[in-house]
Amino acid sequence: MVSDGKMSPEDLKVCRAILAGLVSKERSKINFLFLEPVEFSYFPDYLTIIKRPMDLRTLGENLESGLYSDRGEFYSDAQLIFDNAVLFNKGRSDSSWVVGLAKKMAKAFKREREKAETRELGAAISEDISVINKSKYSAALAETAKPEKKKKIKLKLKRNSSAGELTNIDVLAPSSSGSVEKDLAKPTGDTREEKSKPQLKFKLKVSKKSKEGAEKLEGGTNESNAVAAEARKEDPPMKKKLKLKISRGKELPKGVSVEDNAVINPSSNPTKLPKEDEDRSSKEKVVEKQFKEKVDKEENKTSKGEPEKSSKLSSAEKSSKSGSENASKTCVVKTSPSISTSTVTDITTMATTNFAGSTMNAFRRAQCYKVISSLKRRQHANCKWFLKPVSDPKIVKDYKEKISHPMDLSTLSSKLDRHQYETLAHFVLDLRRIFSNCLQYNTDYGDDFRSAAVECFGCAEDLLNFFVAKHESPTVVYPNLLYCWEKCINAIDSLLKVKNADDGHQTAWYFLQPVTFFCSGSYPEGYLERVNKPIDLGTITQKLMLGCYNSVGAFVADCRTVVKNCKAYYADRDDGELFVKRAERLEESMEIHLGELVMFDRSPDGNEAKQKAKSKCMAIDKPSKSFLEDIMRDLRATTYTDRVAKITESGTQYFEMPVDTTLVPDYLQIVKNPMNLQAIDRKIENGSYKTPEDFEYDVNLIFKNCESIPKIIFIQNENTRTW
């Protein structure tokens, strides 16, 4: 709602209708660049050219906050959005296509404005006519309500066809209510049955024409009838009223003719589409073919209203030559994940195959809990970003489109609670995905999220080795990482900081996501005929961090394939010069860092690093007995106050002793690993806890067991209570 009420309700309604039309899904192919503000960090020179930035979201916020006093100010800011896009991108080789989208949106704005104003005008006309008719009819009815002598009309009807006898019927003149009373009178001259024959009366509903005819029978001497007739004459037909109320100018309601519609709006005939709409299909086919590869590549920055470069892999020129068949295949805004379903399946299979022997059991599940709790404690500053699913409304849509398998620590724990992991390998896969997703989505060089993800990932690997792999040795229960995975991440980071010489943008931008991300979820025509192994830097990052590479050579080969694929597809294409140059520039930097990585792998230092990786195991100090006893003392000091009885008692009294299985016979069928505070005291006394995580797990196990019981039974003994 408007906060200060400056704009009139009529103007506000029109502006809202226009804005809704501009941001609608039907225009998602052309409006996505203008929905959010431009990210100035990606376009440092934007504010030097554009003095007053504007976008559709800001436009809507200004409207609802009452910053516009009339619709004219709203119109000016709406047009400013598209004028800015034309001004900034005109003459730029890599983003000149944005000008075409801005012009299409400007035309759409004009159409939405005309539609909204036409609807408002129609509603106003209908309201005025209604008010006029109401006043005239009220005056007419007031006149006709005066008592007057009803005139009779003589009609002759056959009473009995067999006798041929005629009967005279007196018909009263029509009243203002629109009905006629007819009195069946006795036959003329017949007085014998005057008392025995009842008089029959009936009412007949008549139409407007019948009323007019009845009025003519009166000779038109009644002044009130003349007023009523004038009011009815000025009353527009019902069909015209319907047209004013519900027609939107693209089709006529049933029963309304073209002539009727023309009378309603003599300035423009809504039964015909505007010239822009009339030949829109033919024009848009040409425009969509020209900008097909550009529109398809919606990604996070473009979704925030940023002008972007042309799409990486599109068949726009090819489709424009292939006639009507390819012309109908218009690109739409991408809704598929960045990684195709087959790619996700392949990576999952690679990360979990040959580990069927790592079936999850109670002990392994306990070790997984310890990994999670220890990671949260050791990386508490960095882990705060990975505790819950990504929910920021500014990025969540783009995130889900780029990340095929979102994961976070709370979801990981919930899946453990519900026993949804069949093997340890599946648990490790999800744990690693938390941080690989972060690196795949946050692709700016020097981004703090990347460093946080790498630190947490390294800590998680050390904890997996300590709590899981060490106990399973020599059996391998989940895929091992490449021994120099950190150096591989550094090599990818070095590619992220490479900038284009002409515009200063990130050279690797078009190589960070799969080709399907830029082409509406599918490969462009002819791509798979030239490219045998589609790959991108985002997928390489995933494979690296999920343990899919067994050697440095495999990682290096995939990195080189990214550039090789681009050259193979664009080498002889008219629109491929720009992308080939980007690939060559990226290749220059790539070969330097990959060459260093290969040399390290073959050097003595590399061999030494391999051996250290095999024997690497972190050290965790054993907690002291006094430290654990202090924790138990603090735990028992907690109290609980019953809300109803208002009684305060110890919060741990029901967890001190084991559950009496004679009172709860099926307890051990539900709870596989019972635990209580007295048992923890004994384990502390015996020195059974080797790590703080072991102690923490047992304490949490008490309450997890309690939550797993559907009904709790409290038993009052002489000295204590149990449940």
Image: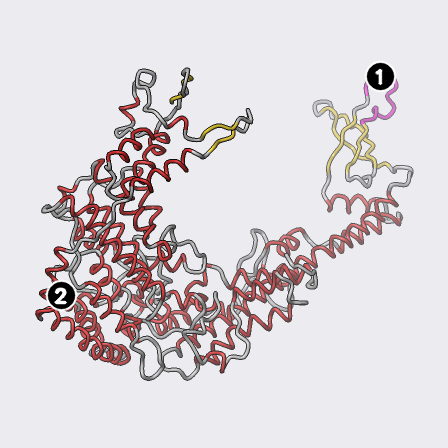
Q: Are marks 1 and 2 in contact (CB under 8 Å)?
A: no
Instruction: Write down the region rendered in magenta.
Output: 184-198
Residue 529 location (% of width, % of height): 17, 67
- Residue 486 seen anywhere in this rendered image of the structure: yes
- Camera-side residue: 575 or 538? 538
Report the residue at 40% width, 16% height from top.
717
- Indicate the quadrant where residue 113 lies: bottom right
- Residue 322 seen anywhere in this rendered image of the structure: no
Residue 125 location (% of width, % of height): 70, 59
Single out the mark in the foreground, 1 or 2.
2
Q: Which mark is residue 193?
A: 1
Q: Main secondary structure of the magenta part?
A: loop
- Quarter of the image where the C terminus is located: top left
- The residue pinned by badge 2 equals 552
In this rendering, position of residue 363 left or right of residue 89:
left
- Indicate the quadrant where residue 397 lies: bottom left
